Image (cartoon, rainbow, N blue to C red):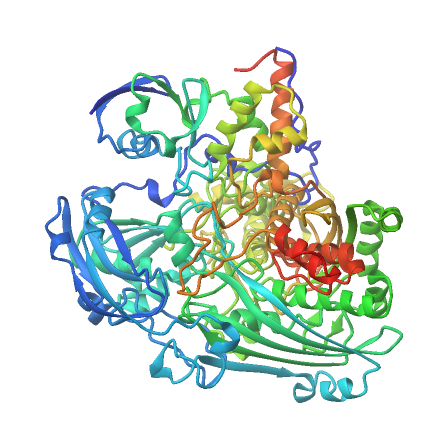
Amino acid sequence: MRITVTVDGTAYTDEVEPRTLLVHYLRNQLGKVGTVIGCDTSNCGACTVHLNGHSVKSCSVLAVQADGAEVTTIEGLARDGTLHPVQEAFRDNHALQCGYCTPGMIMATIDLLSEDPNPDEHAVREGLEGNLCRCTGYQNIVKAALDAAGRMQSAGGNR
Amino acid sequence: MTATMEPRSVEPPNAEHEIGKARVRKEDDHLITGRTRWTDNLVLPGMLHIALLRSPMAHARITSIDVESARTMPGVVAVYTGADVSPDQGSLPNAWQITEDMKTPAAPSLAVDTVQFAGEAVALVVARSKAEAEDAVEAIDVDYEDLPVVLDLAAAAQDGADLVHPDLGTNVSAVWKYDSAEAGTGGDVEDAIRDAEVLIERTFRQQRLIPAFMEPRSVVVDPTGMQTTMWSATQVPHILKIMLSMTLGIPEHKLRVIAPDVGGGFGGKLQVAPEELLTLLVAQKLGKPMKYTETRSESMTAAHHGRDQIQKLTLSARRDGTVTGLKVELLADMGAYLRLVTSGVPILGAFMFNGIYKFSAYHFSCTNVFTNKVPTDAFRGAGRPEATFAIERIMDELATELSMDPLELREKNWIKHEEFPFDTVCGLTYDSGNYEAATAKAKELFDYDGLRREQAERRQRGDTVQLGIGVSTFTEMCGLAPSRVLGSLNYGAGGWEHAAIRMLPTGKVEVITGASAHGQGHETAFSQIVSDQLGVPFEDIEVLHGDTQSSPRGLDTYGSRSLAVGGIAVVKAAERVIAKARPLAAHLMEAAEDDLEFTDGKFQVKGTEKAVGLSDVALAVFAAHNLPDGAEPNLDSDATYDPDNFSFPHGTHLCAAEVDTETGYVTLRKYVCVDDIGSVVNPLIVEGQVHGGLAQGIAQALYEDAIYDESGTLLSGSFAEYLVPGSPDLPNFVTDRTETPATGNPLGVKGVGEAGTIASTPAVVNSVLDAVRQFGVKDIEMPCSPMRVWKAIQSATGGAQ
């Protein structure tokens, strides 16, 4: 099947098998290896991207379902070399160690904050339930999310 | 745009020291932007893909295997069975023959005649894409003939049990003992037991766990260069290189191994894996680049597991609470094969069952047993969490028996601050520690007295939700390891680490380490160390690791050794750089060497303003126009450091658990730990390691369990069933530190990577039991799931089933 997907601002037209997962399309056909695969049961969230502005687990979306849609991956967040506040907050709060869950965690955090711009710790922990991390114990991830919320609020709204 | 928040991690500039600074990590820039180098990202020209057919049977004979349909499927290049690779595949190595008579089964990477665990690979497909390879795997037809499945650890150890490896004649691989009387490090434990005023006998179960690193294992091999290059998501590129070379007979100098970005390991990637061996073998056979990346399901069933012991303990004490003797009898589940360190993991814990206490007599024996499950091997703590769990649980049992406060009982028995260095009953010398200080701080942060009061009130009222307080005062032996000690234990390698420093002419520095980070932040921490040592700015230092071509010597990363051993090698290499530069600096300034002092990166003539920077010397060396006669134009230095002793961090962990007696649900109300890991290089990184360690230790206490059904199928084969905790499942941790420097190295550092995991499991289980002992509950086997807690309360109170 022929699909056209805009990924990180660029439109791509490709032939895909109907069974091709979005995450495989991104990684194997577009070379967008910033988005990773951590499981095969959609539990871990490492593959999280934004589809038309909302977070999805790209292992649970078929590439053909993204036809005509806009996808943002971790690689499309920084604008002109300026990091997204969530990216900065992750770095500044040591919210990553090996970094494997990080792209998905950052994409999920951005989506969480767009729905709930001023969450408390409990809301962050519940909101990130779909993203597993084996390194950090989540404490600094929660800190980073709250820090990013603060930065984005002072900057006057989300990106 | 208003000013953004100042990142909390950047401290005011301190010209004096990088060490101790909460430096934000260098590693992060590429990790937070998706510019990563995971092994699975790698694409090489003409690269082929491997998929594996794995046995669904736990123990069976392969009576026939038909690959003909698979061979003709689209995209398929080759199909191999065990018979095809049998002449070349050798046997996967085990590096630890713990006893002379240890029984080691042949360990094929691709099963030939029989399979010994569900998940063992039986056939291999090479195709032009992963999808085509996986499609072809489904077309392979295997007939299995059932063989008896051995699963129960205790039963497997008995005479007359069905055998995992009939050719070995037994399921017992080895029995290893340590006796303090025999070793001359203490008295006879049988005397202590006989003379005991109080005797506590308990059996504990260390359940099987899965390391479950987030990045699935992946390996790429390119056989087309002058050297064959392997990229692997491994913790151990150097060990892989030598082991694969020896196993497959590939000349060592023709093999290059690279650990690119690696997404976590926790001991689970400390391995010479069948998948790595097969990818290498097949790549060389076909002369083409090859990739294999496992699925998560494959990882759960076929990558090595952790823990899995039955622990029988006997503790003797006096009525006043003074402990006298400890006898430990372990049954350890090896799984179906001895992988790299499988046999030695329980032994690593052998020296730690005494914990921080002054036992006078000790006896340890461990029986390593085969079962038809995937092999066990290193997993965060490797033997020491098992030991700490046992001693910290049984100390609580003793406290309960004597109606003593558990902290008071521990203090009565622990090594006092003034008594260090202390020779333990296990023959180790703990260099330094201050259990009193850590405990006092922890109690205060925890509000120990306040929570005890609340506990009493809830008990009195008979609240549905009861409160329990659990203690764990741990130490551990890490910084693996003094090579001589490893030799005395018959481990196949040493424990040194190597570092090299290259002084570039423009004043920048390259640091090469044999450590192999997979999340630990070595690039940042080692930059801090070198910055202090050489007076070079933090940003001007590049730390290189993971590639045997640029970092040719090393023993990689595990056992909380990278700072305590690897970091010291870096220090020593830096010292050699300065020593090489000194006479050259003196020559450049026409001064006497003795008149020079080196501070802040400069050689200064004492009492004058005359100085020359280390970077100036590096440039002068490059040009070599004006060096003293006979001087070599080179400042680059290296050092290989072998520690004299292990590293002994310690800490006091306090856990408050709320147990809902109607549902069995456990909520961690508060978790406080005060750890002493010696001097701190980067507090951010240290805290991160503690948090991550706590998460895994708490998960063992409450959530994780690798369960097999009666036919040997792993039931917890995905993240849906195997409960790696998510963010709502863990509390906020209150962490603090005391700093009692290690006495054995110039930085005074100890290891921290495994400490959180080692300490936390017993703290949590002790807290759950503390909440429900009042109902007559004696013990709850981990994980303390709601069902298990509820059942324990029900059966103790004679309630409804």
Q: Which image quadrant for residue B130?
A: top left
Is residue B224 among what the camera can see? no
Horizontal and vertical percent position of residue B369: 48, 76
Residue at image position (55%, 19%) is A114
Q: Quadrant of the C terminus of chain B?
A: bottom right
| Horizontal arrangement in the rendering, residue A148 relative to residue A67 (left or right) | right
Res B573 → quadrant: bottom right
- Residue B626 at x, y percent in the picture: 48, 46
Residue B686 higher or lower than B357, as above or below: above
As drawn, the residue found furthest toward the front would be B800
The front one of A75 and B449 is B449
Residue drawn at (44%, 85%), measured in percent from left and top? B160
- Percent x, y of residue B672: 75, 48
Residue B706 falls left or right of residue B798:
left
Q: Is residue B204 visible?
A: yes
Q: Residue at x 55, y 81 (%)?
A: B176
Residue B236: x, y in percent?
43, 58
Q: Please name the residue shown 32% across and 57% down the image.
A: B275
Q: Is residue B134 above or below residue B409?
A: above
Q: Nearer the viewer, residue A102 or B10?
A: A102
How many numbered dots are placed on residues in this image? 0
Q: Is residue B239 above or below residue B137?
A: below
Q: Is residue B402 above or below residue B654?
A: below
Q: Nearer the viewer, residue B274 or B246?
A: B274
Quadrant in which the N terminus of chain B is drawn? top right
